[in-house]
Amino acid sequence: MQVFDCSDNDQLLTGMRAAKVAVSKGQLVVLPTDTVYGIGCDAFSAAAVTRLLAAKGRDRQSPPPVLIKDAKVMNALAEFVPQVARDLATAFWPGALTLILKSQPSLQWDLGETKGTVALRVPDHKIALALLEETGPMAVSSANLTGKPAATNAQQAVDCLGESVESYLDAGESPKGEASTILDLTDITDSYDENGNATSTGEIRLVRLGALSVAAIREVAGDLLAV
């Protein structure tokens, strides 16, 4: 287990290299995000995801979300990306919004009992984004034991997770200190007019209210948001 002080440029560079190597080996890392600290691993390593869930004291019924470097990655990971999802991503990514979509069935991954869905987010944190640029999509859950408060600094994560994590990237206190808002868009479908313009219909379900407000979401999603 190593903790890297990311306010020190030398430790930041060393820590990023160590985290990249750890992820490539199926090990766990703790990384800062704009919401709370996350415990993460290679999203495409079933063994690593199993290790992540075990570290948190979770079972397969609570699959982790997936952090991605930008909205374009949605097209590869989701079977269908409705227009309203693109609008929400444009408005709030990078940021504190997680979108649940139907997962691309051809992907060779196992995040747990997802029921054919995937929860995606682009974090608004330069260290997280830099790591994702190097590793590709990461399965990331809040860096705490299940039932305990989410870690908003690296020391809280260390206290919870200890030696189960290979590398901790310490970037100080989380900017928001609150988890992301989660929306389920799996009921949404699109229809197209004669010019090929898409209109989304269906219902967006609020799964968890977090750092992004309902009012802000409704400005983009309108009456599709079922709250």
Image (cartoon, rainbow, N blue to C red):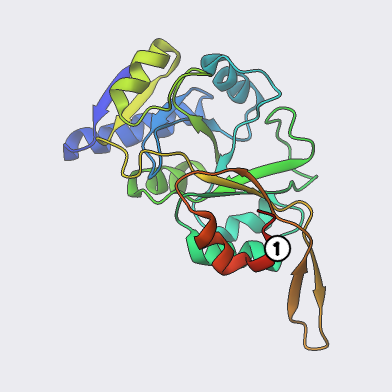
Q: Height in image: 29 above or below 212? A: above
Q: Is residue 104 left or right of residue 177?
A: right
Q: Height in image: 137 above or below 194? A: above
Residue 137 visible in rendering: no
Looking at the image, which is closer to me, 24 or 68? 68
Disc 1 marks which amino acid? Answer: Leu
Q: Is residue 89 left or right of residue 190?
A: left
Please state the horizontal and vertical placement of residue 37, each as a whole percent of the image. Answer: 39, 33
Most distant residue in the bottom direction = 195
Looking at the image, which is closer to me, 82 or 21? 82
Quadrant of res 149: top left
Q: Residue at x 18, y 40 (%)?
A: 9
The residue that disc 1 covers is 224
Q: Residue at x 45, y 53 (%)?
A: 95
Looking at the image, which is closer to me, 219 or 125? 219
Please state the horizontal and vertical placement of residue 29, each as a whole percent of the image. Answer: 43, 27
Please state the horizontal and vertical placement of residue 164, each as a whole percent of the image. Answer: 45, 13
Please state the horizontal and vertical placement of residue 209, each as a whole percent of the image. Answer: 54, 44
Q: Residue at x 82, y 73 (%)?
A: 191
Q: Height in image: 145 above or below 91? A: above
Mark 1 is surrounded, within 10 Å at the Cα level, by few (under 14), some (14 to 19) or many (20 or more) other residues, namely: some
Q: Residue at x 30, y 29 (%)?
A: 153
Quarter the N terminus occupies = top left
Q: Is residue 152 left or right of residue 11?
A: right
Q: Is residue 166 left or right of residue 99?
A: left
